[in-house]
Amino acid sequence: MTLSDNLRGILFMCASMAGFTINDAFMKSVTKTLPLYQTIGLRGLIAVTGLGLLVVVTRAYRFRLNRRDGALILLRSLADVAATVFFLEALLRMPLANLSAIMQALPLAITLGAALVYGDKIGWRRMTAILVGLIGVLIIIRPGTDGFDHWALLGIASVACVVVRDLAVRPIQGQLPSALVALGGAVAVTLMGWIGAGMQGLQPVSGVEAAQVLCAGLFLIVGYLTSVMAMRNGDIGIVAPFRYSSLIWAIALGFLVFGDLPDGWTVLGAAIVVGAGLFTIWRERRLRLLRS
């Protein structure tokens, strides 16, 4: 049976979200006994090796960077480092599903960031959706109430850093291989991990911990590669909404692995954020069709 481009893109996007979320579950589990930065460094070695092999196989290393693109990749890599630290520090202390619910605000935040940085027109409907999504995030974190988890602020900081990371890619020339861009971020995060490990201290790694780190690294590579494949197959307006499947994976893994379930307020806030994001994606697709 031959799959359509859209269906292929949807499957790749679902695989990408599964890969990233399973990686998060392994990282949350192994960092209970292994220092965080040592874990980041070890996982990074796996990711760098996998992406490095991809660069060699595709001969992406032959591409010559100009100074502007080099600066943008550096900015993206630094933002990736900060996003990783904030996310994993929050993940250590929060239920997986709750943190994942906060991260669902990313599409809305990127849309707003593109309007502020690049002057993209978003109109009152999408602006309203962004504000509604913000209300959803506030419901999830519930500041000023007994249910407030201050570690959720690190999740919001991670969202902000991912916005910088993703917007930094936009001006880069189109022929620059994606593998090189991804490798730059992976190298930066790995170096940060080992620098942090040097200050935090190293400890012997057990066989179980080594297996968990290996699985985290492999699923991270799966997430990286399938996310690129998802964006290169089918209509982005059709494929992008399946990014929200990560929340389903996070709830399932959070319950099965850690025995955590999000409370009613978190579910309500996540539903509002996802609904606002889906409306924004639908609106952007509609506007593209009207212009064509």
Image (spheres, rainbow, N blue to C red):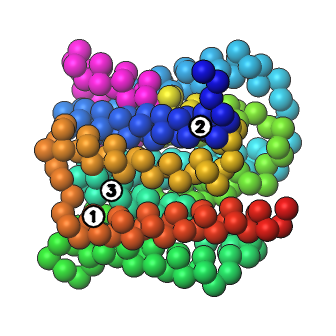
> What residue do we see at 83% from left, 67% from top?
291
User: Which numbered disc covers residue 7?
Assistant: 2
Discs 3/2, front = 2
Q: Is mark 2 on a helix, strand or loop?
A: helix
Query: SS for tag 1?
Result: helix
143 to the left or right of 195: left
Q: Image quarter for residue 253?
A: top left
Single out the mark in the foreground, 2 or 1: 2
**Dot 1, how many residues are within 10 Å of its Cα: few (below 14), some (14-19), or many (20+)?**
some
In the rendered image, the vertical position of residue 78 relative to residue 39, given as above or below: below
Could you tell me which quadrant the N terminus lies in?
top right
Residue 135 rendering spot, x and y as whole percentages: 39, 79
- Where does residue 3 sit, x and y in percent of width and height? 62, 29
Q: Residue 267 location in percent, x, y?
A: 27, 64
Pointer 1 residue? 267
Q: Nearer the viewer, mark 1 or mark 3?
A: 1
